[in-house]
Amino acid sequence: MSSPQLQIPAVRLPHPYLTAYTLHPAAAPLSYRLVLSTSQPADATLPPQLLHNESLSFTLPATTQGAPSADSDNTPYARARRSLHSIIFWTAETTPTVGQLWLLTYVLFTSYHAQETIRITLSGPNSASLRKAALAAFLALPHPFPTTPVIPYPDTSWSTDELLLSRSTFWQGAGSPFGPRAAWVTDPSTLLPTAPQVVEYTFTTKFPSTRVYVRHPMRPCKPAPGSTVYSRWIPHLNEVFTMVAVDWRDAAHLDAFHTWQNDPHVSAGWNQSGPVEEHRKYLQDNEEDPHILSVLGSFDGELFGYFEVYWGAEDHLGAYYRFEDWDRGRHSLVGNRRLRGAHRVRAWWSGLMHYCFLDDSRTQRLVGEPRESNSVVAQYDRDHGFWHEGTVDLPHKRAHLAIVTRERFFKLAALHWGDESGIEGERVKKVEAKL
């Protein structure tokens, strides 16, 4: 492998910190350590706890010789043995924190985004305590034991001390150093006091205007208008994608929505063109509706799109399919012509889905109703794991009923795409077979 350092991307924390980190060669061959970037963005601040540890290093993940063949063995043990392996080591007497291991994991899965799991060996003073803490946080998983079809394996390199870093659990928020919610939704302005996720049912009715009457769980309080609800650094853009709860009182928010809805490209799909008074009322109604959250998306602070996140049971779509209590759906538009393009859609499309799953861990499915004639939207949905469940005839359109499960979304790792090169120089191409 030639010049791996040149292929290592920078890593930035989500909002509100936006701290940048870089990798420097460590003393051991083919090993690196994570340090604060000497060139921080103007809006970056240090996180409340120290996430980099200059005594903490890792070896470049590598294959293990003699691992069971994929052609003959697909047991959990065999799949783990085929994972790349990295040694994480430190020399200082102070044991690294779970937060520092989380940041290193962020680097690994940003760089090796094709890997479902990465095997690690912790090596340093008091490594047993870090192992225990990482397992408790689900940041690491136990290495599976050998099982059938072949026992024992001729693999003498296996150690029961090895752990697995899981790409799926990481992107679901395991080991977050910023509190109980996943790192990408931890803006302090949106955090509520920690409470058990209790379930209490209520009814929503729009009678007599429409004969809709549905029983569903009571929904958590929505984020405050103007608060940041999601933030993630996008490696292939080197920009931060952010979503902010719409505040119709904010002139910039209202102006963006009003301008975009009167763009012929947008109004052809949304049918919401009109005067600013109508758009103010539309956003105000959404704010007062507990089943829908209106958000604006930006790249590096420049607004580009409007999204609506809704609970499926109370939405009009809920009358057309067998909804589950915590189903979530979304609508979207891009109004800023400068920030259009497939390379950006892949970032915000997956980010919007990521937020829907992270916002409430009880959400197991996302649903959608793209217009049957809109093949572009249908393809983006398929690329992110949705399948076509059927056809629904809504009053204003014939649509596909699209569904994706939590497990499927995170298994596919739809946050990364084929034009992104990681530390290994690999170019990962999503193909229909994988989906």
Image (cartoon, rainbow, N blue to C red):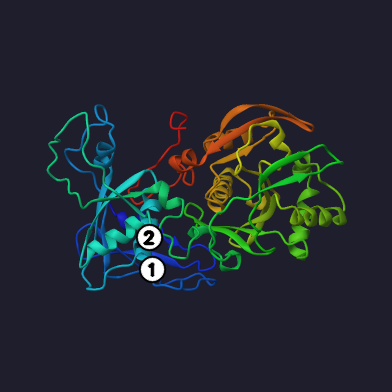
Do we see residue 232 in this rendering? yes
Q: Quadrant of residue 193?
A: bottom right
Residue at x-position 86% and y-position 53% = 278
Instruction: Using the image, tell me which numbered label, if any, was put on residue 102.
Output: 2
Instruction: Using the image, tell me which numbered label, if any, was put on residue 136.
Output: none
Instruction: Using the image, tell me which numbered label, if any, was put on residue 51.
Output: 1
91 relative to 270, above or below:
below
Q: Quadrant of residue 36?
A: bottom left
Q: Residue 312: x, y in percent?
A: 66, 41
Depth check: give the residue in front, 39 or 51.
Answer: 51
Residue at x-position 22% and y-position 41% = 145
Which secondary structure lies at badge 1? loop
Do we see residue 239 in this rendering? no
399 relative to 263, above or below:
above
334 relative to 131, above or below:
above
Q: Residue 65: x, y in percent?
A: 17, 41
Q: Residue 131: x, y in percent?
A: 27, 59
Task: Identify residue type, mark 2.
Answer: Trp
Task: Identify residue type, mark 1.
Answer: Leu
Q: Pointer 1: residues within 10 angstroms few (<14), some, or many (20+)? A: many
Q: Is residue 198 left or right of residue 83?
A: right
Q: Is residue 388 left or right of residue 13?
A: right
Q: Is residue 303 left or right of residue 187?
A: right
Q: Pointer 2: residues within 10 angstroms few (<14), some, or many (20+)? A: many
Mark 1–mark 2 Cα distance, whole angstroms, equals 8 Å
Residue at x-position 71% and y-position 53% = 290
Depth check: give the residue in front, 322 or 16.
Answer: 322
Q: Residue 409: x, y in percent?
A: 49, 41
Residue at x-position 67% and y-position 64% = 224
Image marks 1 and 2: residues in contact by CB distance under 8 Å: yes
